Each structure stands twice: as C-alpha cells, then as structure tokens.
Image (cartoon, helix red, strand yellow):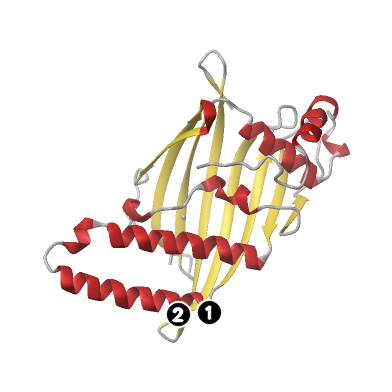
Amino acid sequence: MWSTIRTIANLTGIGLMFMISMQGCMTNPASLSARDALALSASALSGSESYQFAGEVSVLDPGGVVGGRAAYKGEVTMHGKLDMQWKTPTGISQSSINEKTITYRPLQLLESVKATNATISYVEEPSSDRPIRMQIKLDDVTAKERVVKQLKEEFTLLRADKDLLRGDPVKAEEVLRTSEARLEKALTTLKVSTVCQWTANPKSWFPSRLKEETELSYDWNGKPCKEKRISETNFILKGQGGTMKK
C-alpha cells in the first residue's frame, strides 16, 4: 500500500520575523520549547541556499521482514530547486521499491506539522554541547491523510506506467480497475501512526537527521494486515565556498 520540499515558514504557528529574532538572541537550547526549537531548525533548513540529503526507505511486514527498500539522494539549490534521485541500495538482495511509482519525499512531513496536529517533545534534555533531538508525533487523522494522499498518487503513477500496457492492454486495465477498487475499500479501514525523530545542531539549528516510522493497519480482501515504513534522511549543508559540511 505505499511516498519538493516546501518547508512552511509558519510551521508551528510562529511568525517568520519572530523566528529570525529568536535565532539571533536565543543561544541556549534549554530556554526553548521543543516546538520553538523545531521551528528554528525548519527555518534554518528552508533558509539554506544549498544543501544535500541522502537516505533510505524500507517497508517491513509484521515479522520485520523487508518487503521493499530503496535509497535516495538529492540536492536543494537556490530558490528551492529540488533534484532527487532513487536507486537500489548497495548490497541489498531484497526486492527494491518500484522507483517509477515512488511519491515519498522525506520533508513532506513538515507540511503536515502544524500547531494543533502534532505533539513535539525533546527526546532528552536539550544542551548546547550535543545535538538536539526532538520527537514529532502526528495525530492519527493527519498521519492517515498523509499516507492516503501518497498511496493515491502512487496508484496514479502506476496507471501511467506504459510498461504495464504491453502485451495485453485490456487485461492490464482490468487488473488496474480491480486493484483500485480493493485499494479504495482498504483505505476505509486504514489506521496510521507516524512518529519521527529530528536531530539538529544546537548552534546553527541546521538539521542533521530525520528518522520516520509509520505504522499501517488495514483490511485487504477481508484479512487484517500490518506494515511499517521506516526512513532515515541525513542532511549536509553546502558552504559558500562550494564545500560540504555536516
């Protein structure tokens, strides 16, 4: 059942000018709430002219067996231009996720985080001497809406895949229609839980890592099913001289 970066300036309901002023005068992470810290870190990311990211996403069954896996890397340059590529992870023998139908974007999470639909907390007491780690838990309604949107976008891409129409287009269309009906029925039973960890530099507030765990439970053809999607994204800030720094 499974996927641009548009960081919202008022991600947590805080005005942009307020965030800028906080960046200039709030130097002690302990003086900030977790929500304010996340807002600063998201602002640091969206305000960066150039940075790179790389990561991997996996889909696991209830037994922890990997059903699909894919790696990604990308770069964001001036004016928010995104270049993202998918590849099969090195040394992976399990089936890879179909790159033609992936709509997952790691930072789409930020579009879902608003003041009233996410719980944001520190994983540990914040300190200026170590990376700041925050936990983001979406409320279940928002988490479901996010996954449903991704699944429907992926099905649209699947339908547009010309390779499926080779051989017997009529049969392919019949299979697609049947699968779409089953998907829509399964979505009515879908329950989703999404928890993420966001790690940021306590001085620059630029993020270093985003890890997401999303659990799905639903009925498929009358049988209960569960899946888990795990992704981890690492960020690298590009210096003005063209060099990359973590």
Q: Check disc 2 and report its element: helix, strand or loop.
A: helix
**Which residue position is annotated with label 2?**
185
Residue furthest out toward the right:
31
Image quadrant occupied by the C terminus: top right
Instruction: Give the x, y percent position of residue 164.
Output: 21, 62
Direction from residue 176 to residue 239 in the image, left or right: right
Direction from residue 206 to residue 23 in the image, left or right: right
Q: Can I make out residue 10 in this image?
A: yes
Q: Can I make out residue 2 in this image?
A: no
Residue at 78% of width from left, 47% of height from top?
35
Q: Which one is nearer the viewer's eye here, 141 or 29?
A: 141
Residue furthest out toward the top:
241
Marks 1 & 2, CB-CB < 8 Å contact: yes
Instruction: Give the x, y percent position of residue 224.
Output: 49, 81
Amino acid type, label 2? Lys
Image quadrant occupied by the N terminus: bottom left
Above or below, 11 against 160 in this view is above
Instruction: Give the x, y percent position of residue 89.
Output: 37, 45
Amino acid type, label 1? Thr
Q: Which of the 4 quarters of the picture holds residue 166?
A: bottom left
Numbered badge on residue 90:
none
Above or below, 108 against 161 in this view is above
Q: Which of the 4 quarters of the picture holds residue 185?
A: bottom left
Above or below, 112 against 29 in this view is below
Residue at 85% of width from left, 26% of height from top?
25
Q: Check disc 1 and report its element: helix, strand or loop.
A: loop
Instruction: Give the x, y percent position of residue 192.
Output: 58, 68
Q: Which one is nearer the viewer's eye here, 56 or 194?
A: 194
**Which residue position is annotated with label 1?**
189
Direction from residue 192 to residue 137 in the image, left or right: right
